[in-house]
């Protein structure tokens, strides 16, 4: 009978380990230096002042340098899930991992008008 009393304890332990891994997955920390190598697709549109993309509709493309990192990562995740509808952004976001999105967010959050590595970002 003692062996049967161990099963509930093992189930609770397994549940706690699983919950911890899920919580850890939600806490992806971005790295601006790593993001520097991941923004090459972004700069083609987001580094041009007053740029408008015209496929399939005309979209005003925002300058995102200095934007909140969590907002950028959240927006990219929304494009990836299809919650935001721009087709080009959805395609780009689909290729990104959660870590990529966090890194890109941190990179853009660190950009200012005086940033030496392309102040238009």
Image: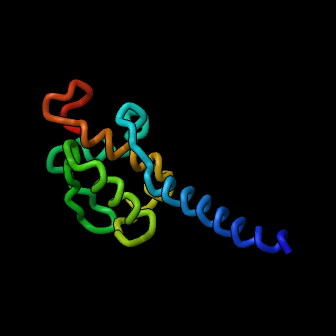
Q: Position of residue 87 (x, y in %)?
A: 39, 65
Q: Is 25 on the left or on the right of 108, as rendered? A: right
Q: Is 81 on the left or on the right of 6, as rendered? A: left
Along the line of sight, the residue nearer the viewer: 115 or 13:
13
- Kindly indicate the quadrant of the structure image that contains residue 61: bottom left
Q: Residue furthest top?
A: 116
Q: Position of residue 49 (x, y in %)?
A: 16, 45
Along the line of sight, the residue nearer the viewer: 55 or 8:
8
Task: Give the number of marks.
Answer: 0
What residue sits 46% from the left and 59% below the top? 91
What residue sits 41% from the left and 50% below the top? 101
Q: Position of residue 116 (x, y in %)?
A: 22, 24
Along the line of sight, the residue nearer the viewer: 48 or 71:
71
Render colour scheme: rainbow
Picture layout, residue 96 above or below residue 121:
below
Q: Is 18 on the left or on the right of 81, as rendered? A: right
What residue sits 26% from the left and 47% below the top? 46
- Kindly indicate the quadrant of the structure image that contains residue 65: top left
What residue sits 40% from the left and 61% below the top? 77
Along the line of sight, the residue nearer the viewer: 23 or 99:
23
> Where the N terminus falls, by quadrant?
bottom right
Picture layout, residue 27 above or below residue 111:
below
> Where the C terminus falls, by quadrant?
top left
- Kindly indicate the quadrant of the structure image that contains residue 16: bottom right
């Amino acid at each position: 009978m003692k062996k049967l009393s161990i099963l509930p304890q093992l189930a609770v332990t397994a549940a706690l380990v699983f919950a911890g891994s899920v919580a850890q997955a939600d806490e992806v920390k971005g790295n601006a230096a790593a993001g520097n190598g991941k923004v090459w697709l972004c700069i083609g549109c987001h580094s041009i002042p007053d740029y408008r993309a015209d496929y399939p509709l005309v979209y005003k493309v925002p300058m995102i340098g200095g934007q909140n990192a969590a907002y950028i990562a959240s927006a990219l995740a929304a494009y990836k899930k299809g919650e935001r509808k721009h087709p080009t952004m959805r395609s780009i976001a689909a290729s990104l991992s959660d870590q990529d999105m966090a890194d890109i967010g941190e990179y853009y959050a660190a950009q200012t008008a005086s940033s030496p590595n392309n102040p238009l970002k």
